[in-house]
Image (cartoon, rainbow, N blue to C red):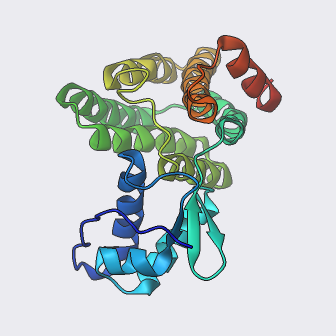
């Protein structure tokens, strides 16, 4: 039997955004502990609680199922499933395979147009990091990586990485203000951009690798803490998961 849902705020009556708002509402309820992993919830009750029809709620849940955050059960039931550490490691293995050649290519072909766009995006990232706006900062972080992939000229790789980052976002996997500050994340992008602007493909690739490996391993460690709770994962645990996917 499905468990009663906690109190959720009714969604704003904004037609085209109801699916996105429903996704955000479920994510927020998971993040603050109102909805818990393993508990069976009712999609019908969720729609009632959010004050919308079952159609946008069903679409939102399908999106969350696609990235692995929920599991559907019979008769409109679903359970929350926290991201596994191996899922995170797999995502970063693919990102490393695609983004290192991309940044190398962008650095080798950098021109005035790319330089202007990179400088503008970095300025926006720094502003967001200083004001502490995580959502705004992550939008510019996403745009910076996307810009590099765009200039590298591989649209398929760009689409895949964008999808992987959306999956990571929907899974709620973020190191911001958990294992490092927004300022720390921002600083990791400086050597990447500097190397691209200087036309140094090897240096750019090394800096991108450092950034992605650091981010990925921190996220794997966070996911392991959820899996092993109340035990604390050690470096060997992270190494084992990471090496199985990446090395």
In the displayed image of the protein, which residue is found farthest to the front? Answer: 1
Question: Residue 24, how many percent across, how many down?
Answer: 37, 60
Question: Residue 54, how many percent across, how many down?
Answer: 43, 85
Q: Is residue 234 above or below residue 161?
A: above
Q: Quadrant of residue 94?
A: top right
22 lies left or right of 41 = left
Looking at the image, which is closer to me, 210 or 178? 178
Question: Residue 138, how many percent across, how many down?
Answer: 37, 40
Looking at the image, which is closer to me, 157 or 169? 169
68 lies left or right of 127 = right
Identify the residue at horizontal 61%, vertical 83% (top origin): 75
Q: Quadrant of residue 156?
A: bottom right
Q: Is residue 104 above or below residue 44?
A: above
Question: Residue 40, how many percent across, how many down?
Answer: 55, 65
120 lies left or right of 99 = left
Looking at the image, which is closer to me, 145 or 46? 46
């Amino acid at each position: 039997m499905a468990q009663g849902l906690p109190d959720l705020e009714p969604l704003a009556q904004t037609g085209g955004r109801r699916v996105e708002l429903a996704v955000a509402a479920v994510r927020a309820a998971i993040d603050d502990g109102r909805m818990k992993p393993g508990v069976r919830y009712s999609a019908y009750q969720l729609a009632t609680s959010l004050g919308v029809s079952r159609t946008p709620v069903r679409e939102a849940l399908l999106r969350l199922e696609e990235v692995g955050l929920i599991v559907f059960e019979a008769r409109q039931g679903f359970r929350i499933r926290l991201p596994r550490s191996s899922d995170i490691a797999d995502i970063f293995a693919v990102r490393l395979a695609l983004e290192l050649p991309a940044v190398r290519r962008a650095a080798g072909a950098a021109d005035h147009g790319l330089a202007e766009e990179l400088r503008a995006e970095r300025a926006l990232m720094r502003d967001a990091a200083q004001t502490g706006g995580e959502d705004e900062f992550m939008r510019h972080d996403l745009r910076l990586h996307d810009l590099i992939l765009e200039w590298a000229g591989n649209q398929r790789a760009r689409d895949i990485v964008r999808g992987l980052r959306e999956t990571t976002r929907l899974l709620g996997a973020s190191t911001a203000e958990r294992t490092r500050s927004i300022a720390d994340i921002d600083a990791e992008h400086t050597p990447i951009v500097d190397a691209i602007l200087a036309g140094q493909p090897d240096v750019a690739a090394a800096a991108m690798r450092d950034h992605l490996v650091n981010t990925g391993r921190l996220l794997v460690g966070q996911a392991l803490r959820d899996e092993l709770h109340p035990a604390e994962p050690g470096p060997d645990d992270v190494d084992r998961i990471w090496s199985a996917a990446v090395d």
